[in-house]
Image (cartoon, rainbow, N blue to C red):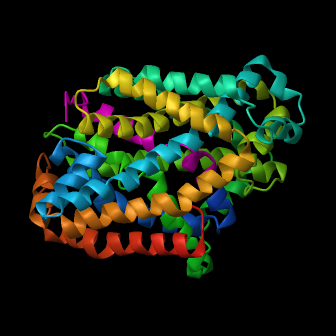
Amino acid sequence: MKDKKNFSSQWGFILACVGSAVGMANVWGFPFRIGSLGGSAFLIAYLIFVAIFSYVGLSAEYAIGRHTGTGTLGSYEYVFKSRGHKKLGKVVGWIPLIGSFCIAVGYSVIVAYVLKALFQSVTGSIMSVDTKAWFESFALTEYSVIPYHLVIVFGVIITLVVGTKGIEKTNKIMMPLFFILFCILAVRVLFLKDSFEGYSFMFRPEWKDLTNPKVWIFAMGQAFFSLSVTGSGMIVYGAYLSKESDIVKSSVNTAFFDTIAAIVASLVIIPACFSYGVDVSSGPGLLFVTLPAILQDIPFGRVFAIVLFLAVVFGGITSLQNMFEVVIESIMYKFPHFKRRNILAVLAISLFAISVNMEAIFIWGPWMDFVSIYIIPIGALLGALTWFWILDPKELLSEINVGSSKKYSSSWHFIGKYIYVPLAAILCFIAVVKGISF
């Protein structure tokens, strides 16, 4: 990879990876799933999958990126070439890469929605509207959030102009603020009437729900996508990781903070919903209809609305950073004479030109479902198969052990090959055959 620059610190790397992982999957995806799939039962299943996926799946993506010194396209080419299938590798790598771009297209619209909500929280206008009618006024209208959409795309460009330095610096600010802001909200929600019913729902074990296959399937899907283990996104950050870093430890730390973010978001949303008797399984409406309605009804609600939407904007921008960086690095790999800033400008213009036509929820909703059902699960499975079935196990283990405080043996690879890969295959099969969106 041309002019590769490492993260300046292990903490900066972890925050960048957490920033990529933290997003809508944490803010409304996790609370929605935990609210509609048995509360604590879903949480238990989710934690089991997060532990497995971070230990082997996320570690493998970091390792292959660092080993090859490049991102998605270069890594797949390298692995397949090592087995005498270079041409196949050149094709396979495009699938997860296209998935990253497709996610960014729809994701930029969602973050534009959030920025609009933040702006109207600052002006105070959101505190007096009928939230359902307000949300529908732009969610059901085409070309409704163009100014906010432009600000989001331009903001991501600015943070990425200087490469890893920009990613690291923004995440060192945004991610701690994300956690602080949501913790402030969680403390406020603690004092709402009947909020403890929400905590009981989240943390009181209902063992019978663990026998429900749906709980395990959706917990697995949530773990895959919350950690951004999609056969693409985390490879490029691994390419920027120094040889002194402990890969497995970094993966576990990323998963830990990502899970904390999801739980903290749930500690805000679920108890608030119980307090006000609203449906926690409202999907996008939870963030744009239910929560604003709750905030209108509590003291200093405007302040807390600003806090909420500011935190979510931060999470959205850091996730978009990763989606952009994945594509930028692969283009630079294919065309090393191209300048980073020029690629970034063309990418941003292309993404905006496509996504501006998806600003209505009836367009971006099906688009994101399509990406979630087909492209991401297929990319995740391709990545899992490539790292654990095609790449030489000794080569992967050797990279895992570089910089590690302990030596990982063939048992680590066994877990990846015979547990992680089958789980990825199951998820892909269920998503594609059953048409289930995660």
- As drawn, the residue found furthest toward the front would be 87
Q: Is 63 positioned to the left or the right of 310 in the image?
A: left
Foreground of the two, 325 or 36: 325
For the residue pair 176 and 352, the one nearer the viewer reads as 352
Q: Quadrant of the N terminus?
A: top left
Does the image show residue 223?
Answer: no
Question: Residue drawn at (58%, 58%), measured in percent from left and top?
Answer: 370
Q: Quadrant of residue 314?
A: top right
On screen, residue 188 above or below 53: above
- What percent of the width, then of the height, locates residue 141? 80, 38
In the image, what residue occupies the spot 57% across and 66% down? 42
Observer able to see residue 374: yes
In this orientation, which residue lies closer to the viewer: 178 or 109?
109
Q: Give me the residue at 35% from left, 55% from top.
A: 231
The C terminus is located in which quarter?
bottom right
Q: Report which quarter residue 91 is drawn in.
A: bottom left
Q: Main secondary structure of the magenta part?
A: helix
Whether residue 303 appears in magenta in the rendering, the answer is no
Residue 184 rendering spot, x and y as whole percentages? 61, 32
Provide residue 95's location: percent of width, then percent of height. Answer: 39, 55
In reply to whether residue 17 is colored magenta, the answer given is yes
The magenta stretch is 1-30
Image coordinates of residue 170 in percent, x first then y, are 42, 24
Residue occupying the point 23% across, 47% down:
74
